[in-house]
Image: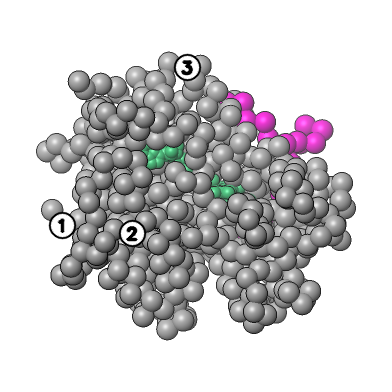
């Protein structure tokens, strides 16, 4: 039996919940999410959300910083929309109950790398995402929105070129049901689970990108994955982000010999763009023969550290590390996908009736490298535009790209299907922070062979593995084609940016 709604929203992170809360004013809404409602990247966001709301700031400066971080590939119009809508979307979040931190009625504004002003709003110190998820999730549960947890979308239904619904499986019973809607909104997040070391939770398996690609939508900028410089590295302790805001407060990175090394790599030192800091750490680890460096906050006021970063302080303390007395062992981890399902500035994909917002979407605002805390902002700015557009235009689509590429066929035999850790090892070793042509070629062939040998997916893990393999292939192929280094994409065989590469790579499945 088919269930019908005006809107199907896939995913219950900030993008999905915010879109659903707006859409419910205009029609019936069903949110499908493959885990519990708060199993998503959003819940783990620490630093906060960027908006030029300080008295010394304005959206033009925010735009300038965003464009500079994106290393020549930012879509200027999309970025302008992003920064100009920021203050209004922050007001919406406040109206939805997000308790941003303030002092004497003035919102507190933190600093993060490559921002020229303090412009990061946060909640609960370093628990911004948890507060957002709690506020929006609570409201959604109390509203007329239908929320179906533990339901994984496994296919988008496209009829006569238009997306009319989805096929989704109840992961507890394995029963598959069809859901139809006038508007299908992908809000499925990123693909950090592609890598052995990642800040992203288990659900982050690139499903939305794989679903959209299989449905004929275009995906772009897949070579640009951001590695966060500082994830906690302690033996036996699950990976945990140590927010960039810690460096924004004055934390210093030291190598195994105790040297503060960042000034050797960049004038901006600890506040250089993320890709620069991540690569500097990799280089220091290699030079000193260790698998970690240290983030030192011992010179900062201990009370201030505990108050500003209560979650980080508690997590480390719970694992026997008092960060006010000992340096924090850290190393880089896969964190955020700049690319994704290509959309126009209204969140329309190249398939009619199919919208995308949040990390799954590629609006072009981040270019080759995302400015810290611009991603939570992007989710709400473009989720709002998706809902606006769904009212104004029924099932338009973004125009297709001339010269979109197809995945090459290598005519290989299928190899036995890998498990997730083998795939993550391959991606980390060959499509990671530092890449080269030989490694990328090896990855593309191996991924193609693994995909060819994959049995039909039948449950959540096998669907996720199949999606990861497809998304990994798109990433590796794009990284192999881009014979230059730009933003988060760094190749030792082409270590500089090249003018001819000031363009984006778009993939579309052969019809
Ligand atoms: P998510 O929050 O990841 O939600 C995706 C949802 O889709 C989940 O509910 C998932 O279960 C569901 N889903 C996926 N596939 C399917 C399927 N097939 N069927 C049904 N449901 C599906 N950004 C900032 O701007 N500031 C920060 O301070 C910040 N800190 C971060 C800290 C950490 C540790 C991490 C991991 C990320 C951080 N980011 C930060 C990035 C930011 O949190 C994410 O980009 C953002 O939350 C993405 O929101 P989303 O709604 O698009 O996706
Ligand atoms: C962090 O707090 O360092 C994460 C911020 C982000 O990813 O934007």
* Residue 241 as seen in the image, left or right of residue 397: right
Q: Are marks 3 and 1 in contact (CB under 8 Å)?
A: no
Residue 487 appears in the picture as rendered: no
Front in this rendered view, residue 346 or 359: 359
* Residue depicted at 39% across the width and 25% down the height: 148
- Magenta span: predominant SS is loop
Numbered mark located on residue 418 in the image: 2
Residue 168 appears in the picture as rendered: yes
Q: CA distance from mark 3 to mark 1?
A: 41 Å
* Residue depicted at 52% across the width and 56% down the height: 198
Residue carrying label 3: 143
**Quarter of the image where one finds residue 351:** top left
| Neighbours of disc 1 within 10 Å: few (<14), some (14-19), many (20+) | few
Residue carrying label 1: 510
For label 2, the SS is loop
Q: In the figure, 91 relative to 373: above or below?
A: above
């Amino acid at each position: 039996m088919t269930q019908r709604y005006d809107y199907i929203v896939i995913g219950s992170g900030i993008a999905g919940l915010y879109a659903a809360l707006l859409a419910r004013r205009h029609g019936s809404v069903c949110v499908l999410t493959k885990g519990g409602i708060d199993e998503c990247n959003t819940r783990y966001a620490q630093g906060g959300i960027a908006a030029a709301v300080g008295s010394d700031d304005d959206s033009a400066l925010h735009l300038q910083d965003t464009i500079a971080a994106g290393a020549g590939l930012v879509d200027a119009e999309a970025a302008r929309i992003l920064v100009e809508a920021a203050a209004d979307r922050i007001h919406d979040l406040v109206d939805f109950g997000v308790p941003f931190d303030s002092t004497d009625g003035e919102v507190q504004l933190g600093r993060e790398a490559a921002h020229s002003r303090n412009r990061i709003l946060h909640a609960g110190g370093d628990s911004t995402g948890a507060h957002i998820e709690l506020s929006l999730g609570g409201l959604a549960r109390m509203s007329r929105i239908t929320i179906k947890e533990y339901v994984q979308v496994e296919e988008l239904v496209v009829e006569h070129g238009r997306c009319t619904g989805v096929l989704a499986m109840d992961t507890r019973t394995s029963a598959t049901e069809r859901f139809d809607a006038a508007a299908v909104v992908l809000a499925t997040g990123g693909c950090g689970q592609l890598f052995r070391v990642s800040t992203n939770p288990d659900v982050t398996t690139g499903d939305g990108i794989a679903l959209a690609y299989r449905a004929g939508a275009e995906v772009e900028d897949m070579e640009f994955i951001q590695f966060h410089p500082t994830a906690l590295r302690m033996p036996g302790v699950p990976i945990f982000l140590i927010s960039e805001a810690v460096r924004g407060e004055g934390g210093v990175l030291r190598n195994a010999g105790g040297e503060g090394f960042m000034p050797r790599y960049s004038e901006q030192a600890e506040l250089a763009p993320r890709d620069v800091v991540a690569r500097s750490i990799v280089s220091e680890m290699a030079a000193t023969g260790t698998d970690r460096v240290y983030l030192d906050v011992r010179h900062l006021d201990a009370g201030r550290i505990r108050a500003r970063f209560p979650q980080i302080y508690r997590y480390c303390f719970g694992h026997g590390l008092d960060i006010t007395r000992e340096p924090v062992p850290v190393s880089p981890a896969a964190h955020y996908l700049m690319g994704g399902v290509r959309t126009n500035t209204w969140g329309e994909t190249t398939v009619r009736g199919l919208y995308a917002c949040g990390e799954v979407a590629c609006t072009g605002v981040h270019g080759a490298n995302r400015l810290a805390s611009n991603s939570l902002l992007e989710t709400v700015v473009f989720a709002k535009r998706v809902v606006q557009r769904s009212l104004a235009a029924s099932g338009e689509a973004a125009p297709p790209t001339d010269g979109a590429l197809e995945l090459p066929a290598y005519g290989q035999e299928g190899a036995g299907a890998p498990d997730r850790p083998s795939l993550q090892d391959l991606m980390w070793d060959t499509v990671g922070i530092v890449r080269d042509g030989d490694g990328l070629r090896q990855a593309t062939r191996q991924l193609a062979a693994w995909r060819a040998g994959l049995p039909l997916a039948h449950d959540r893990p096998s669907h996720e593995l199949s999606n990861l393999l497809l998304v990994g292939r798109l990433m590796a192929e794009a990284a192999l084609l881009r014979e230059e280094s730009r933003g988060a994409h760094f190749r030792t065989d082409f270590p500089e940016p090249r003018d001819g590469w000031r363009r984006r790579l778009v993939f579309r499945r052969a019809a």
